[in-house]
Amino acid sequence: MLVNNLCLLAAVLAAGAFGADLDLSKASIAGPAGGGGVERQAVLLLVEEIEARTQIRLAEGSAGTPVIRLTKRNAGPAEGYRVQVTDGGVSIEGNDARGVLYGAGHLLRVLKMSRQKVLAPGGFRIETAPKYGLRGHQLGYRPKTNSYDAWTLPMWRQYIRDQAVFGANAIELIPPRSDDDDDSPHFPKPPIEMMIGMSQAIADFGMEVWIWYPAMDKDYGDPATVEFALKEWAEVFRKLPRVDHVFVPGGDPGHTDPKHLMPLLEKQTANLRKYHPKAKMWVAPQGFSQEWMDSFLGAMKKEPAWLAGIVFGPQVRMSLKELRAAIPAKYPIRHYPDITHTIRSQYGVPDWDVAYALTLGREPVNPRPLDQAAIFKLLQPMTNGFLTYSEGCNDDVNKIVWSALGWNPDADLHQVLREYSNYFISYAMADSFAQGLFALERNWRGPLLANSGVETTLQQFQEMERRATPRDKLNWRFQQALYRAYYDAYIRARLLHETAAEERAMERLRQHGAAALDEAERVLDGAAMQRPAASLRARTFELAEALFQSVRMQLSVSKYQAIAVGRGANLDAIDQPLNNAPWLKGRFAAIRATRDTGQQAAMVREILDWTNPGPGGFYDDLGHPAGQPHLVRDKRYEEDPARLASPLAGFAINADAPIAPWRMSWLNHAESLNDASFSLRYQHLDPSARYKLRVTYAGENSQVTIKCTAEGQLIHDLLQRPRPVKPLEFAIPQAVTADGTLTLTWERPKGLGGNGRGAQVSEVWLVRE
């Protein structure tokens, strides 16, 4: 009977779950008879990874006692294997060459390894094969990453092997020319040389080599441009030892009309097969306008013979279900999920606190096992598999979650993370570190001010830190989790401190009005200078240095030459203001500039009453997880993680440009994507009253216009967001609220392409006149 893996892991890691453990400290490893290639890699995997963790190098052959015996039986489902532990030894039987490798990886994941000790769980037995035939990750050697550009070929080879241990069977590379700079100060080799070496390493493990190849030139309607592209791509194809598939995004980056893109890719397919005769071409309709999407779907109806399949990734304006229905059934759809970003992304963190968005930013260390599982379980059944979108080792945990679920969609996540922790950290911390990863995800749930669990998470990791061995402390995966635990706790300490300081400043204004401006400003400045929890900040900086040394993570532009603050260099944003002080100080200056005491009093009152809608009115701070009671949310995250049909919290934050002295309420917003709209719904209004809408359109792109309607009646037509930001007011027709209810709806122009963003609203007051 075929048993899916991981279901026994909790028992495996419990002492004595199957009887006495089998001591392998004097074992030998016997590979398949005549086995080379991938089978040889399986033997080396066991020898080298056991030695790295135990200082014991097991001999090859059958002379030791007991014997770990690897065989290939050439039968059963592809990539499957059986692993069994008996009193006489360990047997790993692969259904094929990859099955031998994955069986060896599974054994490593359940071994109990420590210094001078290696034990196999007594009586362990599992037989399993993968559910999905494509399970992989994009690993791009390019400047626009937070670590990858500094990795040497041995580091890449180790990381590719790590993915194989957890069942990945494909890696996607990036060519020398994409939307990145040509060079990075961290590159140990030129891009094409590293691409060749990575392609060979992937091939050595018997894994598929994919290339993500954006079409970057401006006009593929120009024959000269097409000829240039054919020669450029051919040079890359010619040099790589293995290529199985090429995936070309229609946008993000590149922006090519399908009427030119499809003929180009037909030519590039023939170009590719000159050097790799069995290689296949895939395309994604990313960033297409509705006009271009219609053109693309029209081309697909002709069922081009050269095309192997379609990719569903970021900025595809249709849902996966809609795309699957529109594409001929003969074409498989591969998922390209963004597992690396937190904001302005395909699957952002739901209802993230703006304090985190301001500091941790778009590419932090981001273990999100529950979110990733929700995305996988909703969408993966409509695909043939996945290669994830990654821009650094910050998403390391998420890669393993996807690989594990791609093998067994019913896998228990707690057991998956115990495997991760057992293999990558230590047997001694298998459970505690796994639970810590879940705790880091909980740190990001709900308003940070109310999330006292952040301190508990830090205490748990500090206890692990105290118990850690020197080897553990040098482990980059352990360092990453510590970095996040300390960083999160420091940000919460600052948020509490600065929020309290702002309230003290406001109290001064309430008591003394404009006469208290200087005193209120001193309170705000004092809070900015008096850093709370300084030891947490100091430890965060130490861990950033450790991560640069261990895995080349570039957590600062100034210290480690990261390409940009927004590309994972969140150490540079750790002291970003977390209250309204910058905006308040600007308003204080404006008040001082006015000589009219009556006007000064009115301006102070405006500050103090900012969120007050008046009697019978309502205020929503859209984007704030606890401040938007009227926002209509018909779908849970698990039902619409990409928020293609439901509103999401967005952020008007560019970490690489000076942040304007905006209110905190302007830095986040509610928004809808593409042609979707979103609404606020009010009930129990006074049918005899008149109301007006007061609204702030901050948002990230003032060029995309926005429209508001109420029950189908136009409140205002498409308009640009005002800069500088200021509230706007509009009358609500009394007939609209005559039944005591009101639904306000916002949308951007229909049919636009690009990232889909634009219908963004920061604050709404419904004011009874």
Image (spheres, helix red, strand yellow):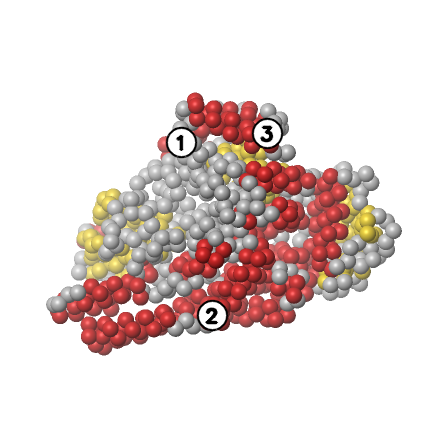
Q: Tell which circle, 3 or 1, labels the residue nearer the N-terminal end.
A: 1
- Residue 452: assigned label: 2
Residue 284 shows up from this direction: no
* Place of residue 688 in the rendered image (x, y in percent of width and height, measured from the top left): 18, 59
* Residue at position x 22%, y 48% in the image: 715
Which quadrant holds the C terminus? Answer: bottom left
Q: Is residue 721 left or right of residue 211?
A: left
- Residue 218: assigned label: 1
Query: Badge 2 local density, few (<14 within 10 Å), some, or many (20+)?
Result: few
Q: Tell which circle, 2 or 3, labels the residue nearer the N-terminal end.
A: 3
Q: Secondary structure at mark 1?
A: loop
* Residue at position x 19%, y 72% in the image: 514
Quadrant hosting residue 718: top left
Residue type pointed to by label 1: Lys
Residue type pointed to by label 3: Arg
Q: Say which residue label 3 marks.
A: 238
Q: Is residue 203 left or right of residue 265?
A: right
Q: Secondary structure at mark 2?
A: loop
